[in-house]
Amino acid sequence: MYEAALSLLKKIHQLGYEAYIVGGYPRDLYMGIPSTDIDICTSMLPDMIGENFSIVESHFEYGSFVIEESQFRFEITTYRKDYYINNRYPKIEFVDSLKEDLNRRDFTINTLCINDNGEYIDLLGARKDIDHRKLCMVGDPNIRLKEDPLRIIRALRFASDLDFEMDTPLYESIKQNKELLNTLSLSRMEKEIQKVRNQKKWNEWIQLLDLSSYLP
């Protein structure tokens, strides 16, 4: 699947656009963790993605598609900025800069990219934070958690499953903003909590941050 993803990146590059594997797969590959979930970000606009690839699932308004290539399925998303409304619904603006796209993502460890030569592209210090086993938010945690409080649960999940420590700004921001969890729907929280693999560490973080009364 990885080789098919690199070939897909080369194909997009030959069409005149940028494309990178991004997020969980580069992070896990760097850490030596097996993964088969490959996401791709690209400067190619949504209409061009639709013209050039076999679409399995479309979220056109978000510039996000599931495409089938070489018998594998990949999620591919146009570079974008997100502007949040009511702590949940993002307004989308497509951009042509990889760094702008990475700056909308939640944690630095999820901003590591791989290019079509299989080389790491690290614009926001992801590898440093992975090496130090630190979970750090991209940007100001107080702003980013208010944009979407689900990031609190995602922070707990990554800290638990990867056995990372939260950096001080993120930790303190979660303590200060934990009541934002009351604005989330039960279904959104449960969907994220179901992804937790290390239940022991999860419970330790819940107790440490005194979050049990805010979670299902």
Image (cartoon, rainbow, N blue to C red):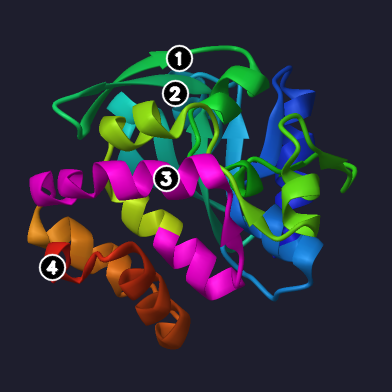
**Residue picked out by circle 4:** 213
Vertical comparison of 105 with 213: above or below: above
Total number of numbered discs in the rendering? 4
N-term-proximal mark, 3 vs 1: 1
- Which image quadrant: the N terminus? bottom right
**Residue picked out by circle 1:** 94
Which of discs 1 and 4 lies nearer the camera? The answer is: 4
As shown in the figure, which amino acid type bears the numbered disc 4?
Ser
Q: Residues within 10 Å of mark 1 (few under 14, many from 20)?
A: some
Q: Secondary structure at mark 3?
A: helix
| Magenta stretch in the rendered image | 156-184
N-term-proximal mark, 1 vs 2: 2
N-term-proximal mark, 1 vs 4: 1
Give the spatial CA distance, label 1 vs label 2.
9 Å
Residue at the limit of the structure toward the bottom, as seen here: 200
Mark on residue 172? 3
N-term-proximal mark, 3 vs 2: 2
Which of discs 2 and 4 lies nearer the camera? The answer is: 4
N-term-proximal mark, 2 vs 4: 2
As shown in the figure, which amino acid type bears the numbered disc 1?
Phe
**Residue picked out by circle 2:** 46
- Residue 89 lies in what quarter of the image? top left
Classify residue 57 as left or right of residue 129.
left
Q: Is residue 143 visible?
A: yes
Q: Residues within 10 Å of mark 2 (few under 14, many from 20)?
A: many
Q: Nearer the viewer, residue 126 or 30?
A: 126
Give the spatial CA distance, label 2 vs label 4.
42 Å
Q: Decide: marks 1, 2 in contact (CB < 8 A)? A: yes
